[in-house]
Amino acid sequence: MIFDQPPQYTLSGKLHGHSHTVQVCEIVAIRKTEDVDDAQTRRHQRKTNQLSQLSPCAFTVSYVRRASQHQWRCSDVTFLCTNQELCEQWIQVTNEQLSLLTSRPKSLLVYINPYGGKQRGKHIYEQKVAPVFRQAGIFTSVIVTEHANHARDHLKTEANLDKYDGVVCVGGDGMFSEILHGLVTRTQTDHKVDQNQPDAELVPCSLRIGIIPAGSTDCICFATVGTNDPVTSALHIIVGDSQPMDVCSVHHGDIFLKYSVSLLGYGFYGDVLADSERKRWLGPARYDLSGIKIFLCHNYYEGTVSFLPAEDNMGHPRDKLQCRSGCRICQHKQSSKDKHSDMSAEKEKPSKDSSSGWNLIRGKFIAINAASMSCACPRSPKGLSPSAHLADGTTDLILVRKCSRLDFFRHLFRHTNKEDQFDHSFVEVHRVRKFSFQPLHRERLSLEDLSDDPVKTCFSPMCCAQTSYRTAHSNWNCDGEILHHAAIQVSVQCQLIRLFARGIEEQQQCV
């Protein structure tokens, strides 16, 4: 491409019949072609050799190129100018335009978990992410965590957050949970908000969080970007994307327990997690083994679920309106009248009287799940709740009542295909803003083993025929961590955090 005109707000031109239009907001970096590193220079030399004789002045633009499956790549294109002055003018004006994009981070605090997933977090960051950050001129402070909750505790007390434009975690969902708890707790502490109060109005975090996937599942990254690709995530951080996200605060009475952004699961998913924690030596395979074991046990739990439904204009979990970039549901803003009525309803205690706004359901449940996002992942492309939204102030409450083992298998199998997983008589789903669960504390245990382990049982499908009842309960699976309190209250904190993401793009133009 030969430029003989002053710069505009986009870079465009034609070379050998190929058209390129580069938006300034998706430019990673711009520099003189001779400033490109040796490998890149050799790569572009053949393309520019013929024209460089006519126009020796050139600059190279690194920009975002959309590939398949929601992946982004950093590509280079070289522009040739008719004279040196024009070349420098293009570089200067483009850099000035880039500096006006205030959403772009200039300094980041990076935490790397070297133990998560396949223990490749440090390698992924150094080989795939750090070079792109350097190319974009982003300063980074890197901390390699040494033990569990290292990042959380550092954020809560030591980190000088005024120096940074965002926090980046390199790891899996567990590492993200550490960053989430550290950053939210630090924000509430700075604003003197008591997290132990279930009705406290939490202060949104000012710093965005970036996720470089390097874990076993990376569910949160997949649900907010559409792929578990480190380079794609790094480019979303560089261009300064911002995706608000709801956070569920979980309490037991007046005691704060945890924050959740993806899955809260009682019964089946809680038992699978509890059992898998005793098999950590197996690595990721432990989830499959524990899943089979718990499925064969086919335990169910009795209790009462109370929930405060979302407004009618917030959609429904079965409306098939998936949350995508620019989602209109997530952009919905409640009027002051709506907020006033909501606060009145939230202060009411759950009761049989539906006029209070709360609904009560008693029964025997194989699983009670709350999905604040689709929870999609490569194994379950649609996720637990395909139409759940990232930032609408709600969570999708899924109740799976006691049913046959075959029926429950049919429900689980639909997480892997395109059929409606809620289309069963024993499954119901509600979009809620708050909910609570009170267990009856009855659980079936083997006559041969009356230990306190709620999931310790045999592999035989007939194991449940030889059972009796005693006081016990399941565990809550909170984004992959165990909550040992069964009785909980959950409130959705609307758009409490923001990620360096933009949601999954509906249509992608591959270049």
Image: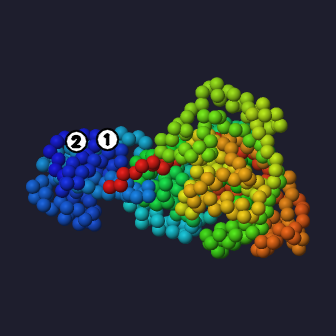
Residue occupying image coordinates x 77% and y 67%: 297
Q: CA distance from mark 1 to mark 2?
A: 11 Å
Scheme by which the image is coloured? rainbow
Q: Amino acid at mark 2?
A: Pro
Q: How many marks?
A: 2
Between 394 and 171, the one lying in front of the other is: 394
Left or right, 55 with respect to 317, comes to left
Examine the rendering and report whether any part of residue 31 can be seen: no
For label 1, the residue is 97
What kind of element bears circle 1?
Answer: helix
- The x, y position of residue 318, in whole percent, is 62, 46
Left or right, 385 with respect to 266, comes to left
Residue occupying image coordinates x 52% and y 63%: 214
Q: In terms of image quadrants, where is residue 277?
A: bottom right
For label 2, the residue is 7
Q: Amino acid at mark 1?
A: Gln
Whether residue 25 is situated above or below residue 47 in the rendered picture: above
Whether residue 433 is situated above or below residue 464 in the rendered picture: above
